[in-house]
Each structure stands twice: as structure tokens, then as C-alpha cells.
Amino acid sequence: MDKSTLTQPPVPADRQPLAAHRDPSLGASQIQFYYPASHDPEVLMRSIEIERELPWNMMIDVAYVGSHGTHLAGDTFRQFSYVHTADKLKYRTALNATVPITDYFSGTTAAALQKVYGTSTLPRSLLLQDYPFFGSLIPQTLFNGATNYNGLNVKLQKRYSNGLNFIMAYTFSKKINNAATAQLAAMLLDPIHNSRPGLVGGRVGAGTGPQTPGGLYQDYDNEKMDRTIAVDDITHMFNMAATYDLPIGKGKMFLNTGGVVNAVLGGWRLTGNFAAQSGVPLHVTGPCNGLTCFPNLVGNPALSKSRPKVAQEADWISAAAFQPVYGSDQSY
């Protein structure tokens, strides 16, 4: 048969409409896939340490510890089909306007889009995406995480002598991540911290709902913009542990006798532990525009420490130090 003489498409053998024979993934609301890593995840660790013996059975230890990780497990469920930032800035409030498909595509592509969606017009926000045939393209995990840590460790230790031994350790450090690092925790629940009312810092404050993910990129076209202090960064950390045998009782400096006195007052040991550390970063958000929810810092967020305790608990930072990201332009 000369098919060129046919005036309409032939009917499939199974008698189903032509639309039932198109690729079933076209126009799918969501497709999940595995995106293999371009490189093996790697972490470079470096350290240098100096120890010095001191009088009175003591020693001091000073060390530098650093690490640099690349190609780490990062974004989870990242949207691959999205409107690029340049187009958001160009169209602003007109981004969601319904326009003809032919404004952006022609030929077989325009015809295929019309066939998939059953209309000749679509929202501009859909047509500007890299993969307009699909509603959502998301991988499970991307290996785009990166982290950098540098720390100074100082330790003072006394071996047991004269009834006393102790160890003191101080760490001064800085940890910097990109926004995607530590997303392996995105599926973990943290009911203890998320049940607390009010603002919460660290990983929990950077996440949403009951999950504990890190931050998200504001601009997927410029991921380096969100390289910043890690959500679990703790700048200062001090720990101390000590034990002291009281010099009382048989063989000791005081009441060196046996009997009842030694049984009651001798052989006592004091043990103490002390730990202090600075807080984790506080994640601040505000009214959003079409690009981000991070406000502009226009003042000093620190409030006076001389305020009553109730006031300090109610307001950790000054809200007046932040300006909505859109500033005075509320049109976008």
C-alpha cells in the first residue's frame, strides 16, 4: 500500500488511540533516576602536632588538623528541570504568563509539546525549563558536596602525681561547606530538636519540617554563592576532666592514722568534668521574592546582654537588622 495516499494516520493494530502509543515518560509528573558520580568521593586530611614536656609531670600538645572533601554525597531530590536565574530576572512577574508554544519552539518539537499537553499554549515557566516535556526530573543523590575544615587543638595534661591528674583541651576551628553537604541526613528524623519552639540553630534550623538536611542552593546557576559557614560549625570548644585524692587518712598528709578516722575520712577522691562551647550558626529567613528567602543584613543583629532574662529568651537577635530580600520593591 502506498502510505503517502492516506489522509489520516492508520489505526494501530490494538485499536488503541495514538496517544496511548507515545513514550509513557513524556509529560510524566515526576521521574526519579540515579545520577552516577563523576568522581569517587574523596577527603584529604592533614595534620601536624608538636608536644613539649613541662615540669611537675605535665605536657602540652599543640596540633593543627584540617580536611578537605570533594565529590561528597550532596543534594537529594534536586530538580533538574528548572527556570534559570537569568530568565527569572528577565521576566519577573510575567514568568507564569500563558504564551504560545511557538514563541519558544518550532517544528516537530512544538508539535510534540502540543501533543503531550493537548494545548497550543503553556506557562512560560514551563517552556523555559531545560526539559519541558517532563513535569519533574529528580535524582536520588548528587555527589556535589564539598567541605573544608581547619582547626587548632591545644591540650594540657598532667600525669598522676601528688594525688592529682587532669587534662584540658581547647579547639579553635572553622568549618565551611557548600549548601549541599551533609544531605545524607535528609531522611533522618530528629524529634528531640524539632520539637523545640522558636528559632533553632545548626542543621535543624537550616532544614524544614521533621527532616534534618543542610541548606539549599539559592541559585543553581551559581552554586559557589552559597559556600559559607557550615550548619554544624562550632568555633570554640573547651573540655576539662580532673581527679584529686584528698590528702586525708593513712599514709596521707593529714590525719595519718588508721582505725575509725581513716575508715570515715580516708580514701576520698574528687572527680570533676567541665565542658563549654560556642553555639552553631543561626539560620535566618524572611519574606521571599522569586529567587530567595534570605534577607539582607542592614544592621547589627546583636542585642544588649543587659536586658532581663525573659527578654533575652524571647528575642535572641534584633529583627530590625534584617531587610526583606525584595527591599522596597514588592513586585517580585
Image (cartoon, rainbow, N blue to C red):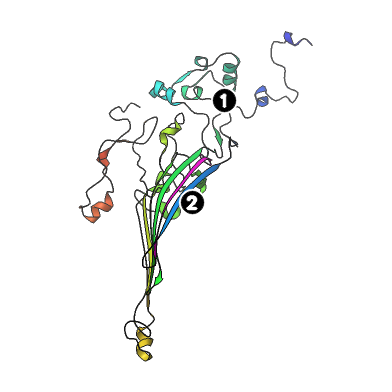
Bin the neighbour count of mark 1 within 10 Å (Cα to Cα): few under 14, some 14-19, many 20 and up: many
- Tell me the residue at 41%/36% (across/down): 226
Observer-nearest of 209 and 66: 66
Q: Which mark is residue 253?
A: none
The quadrant of the rendering that contains the N terminus is top right
Q: Nearer the viewer, residue 298 or 24?
A: 298
Residue 300 quadrant: top left
Q: Pointer 1: what residue?
A: 133
- The reply to whether the magenta stretch includes residue 228 is no
Residue 208 in view (yes/no): no
Horizontal side of 170 relative to 23 (left or right) equals left
Residue found at the far bottom of this picture: 259
Say if the magenta span includes residue 73.
yes
Amino acid under label 2?
Leu
Region in magenta:
55-75
Q: Position of residue 108 (x, y in %)?
A: 61, 15
Which secondary structure lies at badge 2? Answer: loop
x, y (%) of residue 25?
Answer: 62, 29
Amino acid under label 1?
A: Phe
Q: Nearer the viewer, residue 137 or 151?
A: 151
Which residue does the image show at 49% across and 22% down from the upper left? 128
Vertical placement of residue 314 versus 25, above or below: below
Neighbourhood count class around disc 2 (C-alpha, 10 Å): few under 14, some 14–19, many 20 upward: some
Question: How far across and down, in percent of the image, does residue 175 sit?
Answer: 42, 45
* Disc 2: which residue: 189
